[in-house]
Image: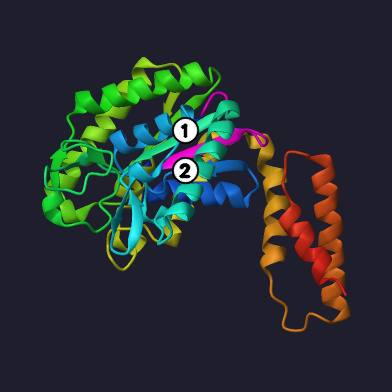
Amino acid sequence: MELLIPIDLKNLADPIRYGDRIFLTGSCFTEHIGNALSELKFRVLQNPHGILFGADSVCRSLNACVHKKKYTPSDLFYLNECWNSWDHHSRYSSTDLSLALKTMNEKIDESHEFLAEADWLIITLGSSFTYKLTPGADLASLHAGDSVANCHRAPQSWFSKQMMATGDIIRVLNNSLDDLKKFNPSLKFIFTISPVRHIRDGVVENNRSKARLISSVQDLVENRGDSFYFPSYELLIDVLRDYRFYDIDLVHPNYAATEFVFEKFMEYGIDPSAASLMKEVKKLVTARKHRAFQPNTASHQKFLESHLEKARQLQEEHPFLDLSKEIDHFSRSIL
């Protein structure tokens, strides 16, 4: 008896390999995938503007990275005792204007260099809704009618909320992907739709919003040879299909759900030949996080020495791995 609806995962014909550079952008679900890949020592850079939900915001972020946009004081506005950017998540806001600009521009520079040599771009879209500034807003360098990536708890009257048409989503994504291919011709794209439900938009409205994203991405995948789709949304909504896989807010996937989806992503997109190396890396990362009750015992010191030797060996055999954190931890912990 089937307890889960089977899903036909068409694995990537040319999968992701260790040593590939992977750029990720989009919703908070992007960071579940990105953090998990980073833990396994894949070369990852994610969300240079912070968490983003809409196609328009994601595309503006990618455009800024490709063209190395330089943020200036006129791009920021002061609200809630912080300097904020309409292009950025609040994690980039700061009480110090110079620090905010420094952080934003350094991340753009890093992202520009990374994207130039990236092999993969993973885009996770969360919502078709966009928020546009009204004439009464504190506009900074924007104009009334321009869309924003984050509302920064500004007054509701500063924004008008609209759902992007499917054709507009396809257009902005296509234009962005074409621009990226001119910048880095070898770049390939994986799209996924965030399974996080935006219930504040309304249940019906959330479903309409997700449907437009799914339809738009399918159009891109069918018409571009460089784009692929990973069904994270379908894995949670149609395969798991149970509130026990959600957090207490009944909106965000819990640990079990995100682990399930990530395992499926590994099957879908990672070269099977990397499996044995991933196991070795995971052992080292787990050992680094281990906190001994009696760190001075001979047995724990032997544990540290053996893992230090293994980390150095793996680092030498696989130069694309960055095991510096593990090597440093084991080295400092040995008496």
Q: Which residue occupies 11% across, 52% down? A: 157
Q: Which residue occupies 57% across, 24% down? A: 14
Left or right: 276 as drawn, with respect to 37: right
Image x and y of residue 19, in percent: 67, 35
310 shown above or below 63: below
Q: Is residue 229 visible?
A: no
146 shown above or below 253: above
Task: Quickly name the residue at label 1.
Answer: 65
Are the residues flagged by discs 1 and 2 in contact, CB closer than 8 Å? yes
Q: Looking at the rendering, which quadrant does residue 70 occupy?
A: top left
The amino acid beneath tag 2 is Pro
97 shown above or below 19: below
Q: Quadrant of the C terminus?
A: bottom right
Task: Quickly name the residue at label 2.
Answer: 48
Image x and y of residue 29, in percent: 40, 49
Question: What residue span does the magenta drawing correspond to?
Answer: 12-25
Q: Main secondary structure of the magenta part?
A: loop
Left or right: 260 as drawn, with respect to 147: right
- Of mark 1 and mark 2, the one earlier in the sequence is 2
**Which of these two is toward me, 307 or 333?**
333
Q: Which residue occupies 58% across, 32% down? A: 113
Q: Is residue 132 visible?
A: yes
Q: Which residue occupies 20% across, 36% down? A: 143
Image x and y of residue 142, in percent: 25, 38
The amino acid beneath tag 1 is Cys
